Amino acid sequence: MIEVRWHGRGGQGVVTGSNLLARAAILEGKYAQHFPEFGPERSGAPVRSYTRISNQPIELHTGVYNPDIVVVIDPTMARNPEGFVQGLKRGGSLVLNYAGDVGRLSHIAGELDVKVHVVNAHRISLEEVGRKIYNVPMLAALARASGLVGLEAVKSALRSRFSGEALEINLRLLEKAYREVESLA
Amino acid sequence: MARVAQVRKTAMMGDEAVAYAVKQADVDVVAAYPITPQTIIVERLSEYVADGELNASFIQAESEHSAISICVGASLAGARVFTSTASQGLALMHEILHAASSMRAPMVMAIANRALNSPLNIHCDHSDVMNARDTGWIHLFATDVQEAYDLTLMAFRLGEDRRILLPVSVNLDGFILSHSVEPLEVLPDHEVPEFLPPKDYPYAIDPSRPATYGAMALPDTYMEFRLQLHEALQKVPSVWGEVSRSFEEVSGRRYSMVKSFAVDGSDAVVVALGSTYGTLKHVARRLRDEGLRVGVASLTMYRPFPEDVLARMLGDVKAVVVMDRAYSYGGLGGPLYTDILSTLYRNGVEIPVLNVVYGLGGRDFTVRDAEEVLRMAAEGAERGGFPEKVVWWGVRR
Amino acid sequence: MLEKIIRGEFGYEDLPPAAIISPSPTSPSYKTGVWRTEKPVIDPAKCVKCLLCWVFCPDMSIKRLEDDSVKIDYDYCKGCGICSEVCPTKAIRMVEEV
């Protein structure tokens, strides 16, 4: 079983990202579970969401404390990823919406013994659609970096959730971010 | 087993799964208060109605008290009725919960269980439904999203059965299940009417045959009417047998009143309601591999209370831990604990019982917590007792 | 069965489920006229057919006739005296039934 913890800010679609990941995994015939960490919903406040993916039925109904993967979809939060790695398993992955100097991340990767994957979803979304949309590009980055779900399944999950222009924009961001993921050795 | 229908595998949140089942049940009336503590259940149903996918009256009430009152009237008119609420909303309905059951108005209500004020809290616990425990409703508990869907369909069939004619609550843990996406197998639309035929209510209001509803009954008859209500609930277990067999035929999934894992041959059993069962089962699987003889049980049906099943199930174990996500303040412990204590006492089973009160206001019950509780249960069996009667789990002191 | 229930000869299963009582109404069989200690008596000579008594009677015990004159149904009249109070011409007098 793989456990994923998502970080971002209220309004950025953290919950939807995690939701879509679970749906994509289920579409692929896997077992999956998505659940948000709810509180009073405040735009801009830190928000978490969780995804579990497994080849066996998932019976657990409790929080994720030792994730295999941490995704930070907000670029300002991702500037200081040290604040979001609590409980991240050694050998796990950190997936960041990152616009800064990639060089300083290798230090974190070494210290925590994790793989770090970055994509500049901030730039991609501004370039592609002129708006800041982070969750779907980061879902693409996560899919590419982890191999947890295939791109086609993610597209199907998007189609089950969006239609029209919103779908078209998200599909474009998905493709673009999927291609641009950078993994630190 | 006859034939399992072609199922459709999908993924849904608990809320969506309940709404989908209600749509497939082809309800006639949905009455609800739409704001906090409401969930996506009625939001989705209002969309189904607006989009023409569900031919029903969606009545937006100005309070939960009105919503449930509308449901009683609609049910007595012969309509298939659904509503949904949680926490303070259920508390506001309380007066009419009694009317719904004693007027024998079948309906289904999903409760996304949440804590009650004060302090203000929106997260999961069972205080809301436990306040409604003695209202004469049938109370069912789902342990995952699939069960929330299945039990919703079964609840209509059970409550509308002519031998029963009672309202049914389907409880799903607030947020933990209501807002979780999980895999879901749904029945094809055309299979549902076969399992759940249209409501055929024998006392439906008919202007051409006037009748008195909700009459006054003074001391010389009131108790007799209340005993009727109790007797109707006593018939539920046998009808449940039929309903669950019939559901198994279309779905392949079987529901007993009490579900259990590895209880046979165990020294100790931990009993819980709702989604905690899954967490306990997950951990118990591992601990059993280590040789710990501990099982887990959960009540799918909490009212009527499945006394006989539990007395048999717990009759041969050496210790029981009862998990309560609610409390009887000033009382002996949590409501499930006192129910199980009574069950054991009046069935002559003398074993130590520990009450673990946990998860109030949404405090997470973790894998580590589950492991500690399961080990504690096994230890209680080994030592022949527990050092305490009631433990408030994880409370800072 | 209704008579037996009224006489108190029943078990809980004999009572209509959920106290849903049909056929309805059953109240006509309950002759509340026996509660009365004073009865209203109409003086037709003084009655101006204004129908105020018919409007105000809480028990619908004043019957309106074809010509808008009124008649009292003593089977149900409880003798409350409201008709006598509201009559503008003092055409209704309350008479002791001792």
Image (cartoon, rainbow, N blue to C red):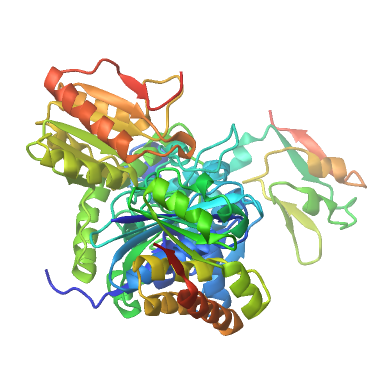
Task: Specify whether A120 is left or right of B380.
Answer: right
Q: Position of residue B353 (x, y in %)?
A: 23, 24
Q: Which quadrant of the view contains residue B287? A: top left
Q: Report the front residue among C25 and A124.
A: A124
Q: Quadrant of the C terminus of chain A?
A: bottom left
| Residue visible at 19% across and 34% down in the picture | B269
**Residue furthest right as drawn:** C89
**Residue furthest front as drawn:** A103
Q: Position of residue B11 (x, y in %)?
A: 37, 68
Q: Which quadrant of the view contains residue B381? A: top left
| Residue visible at 26% across and 35% down in the picture | B371
Q: Is residue B21 visible?
A: no
Q: Total of numbered circles in the picture?
A: 0
Q: Report the front residue among B49 and A22.
A: A22
**Residue furthest left as drawn:** B265
Task: Specify whether B62 is left or right of B160.
Answer: right
Q: Position of residue B196 (x, y in %)?
A: 32, 69
| Residue visible at 28% across and 39% down in the picture | B305
Q: Position of residue B12 (x, y in %)?
A: 41, 65
Q: Is residue C5 visible?
A: yes
Q: Is residue B22 above or below residue B133?
A: below
Q: Is residue B147 above or below residue C42?
A: below
Q: Report the front residue among C87 and B73.
A: B73
Q: Quadrant of the N terminus of chain A?
A: bottom left
| Residue visible at 32% across and 80% down in the picture | B190
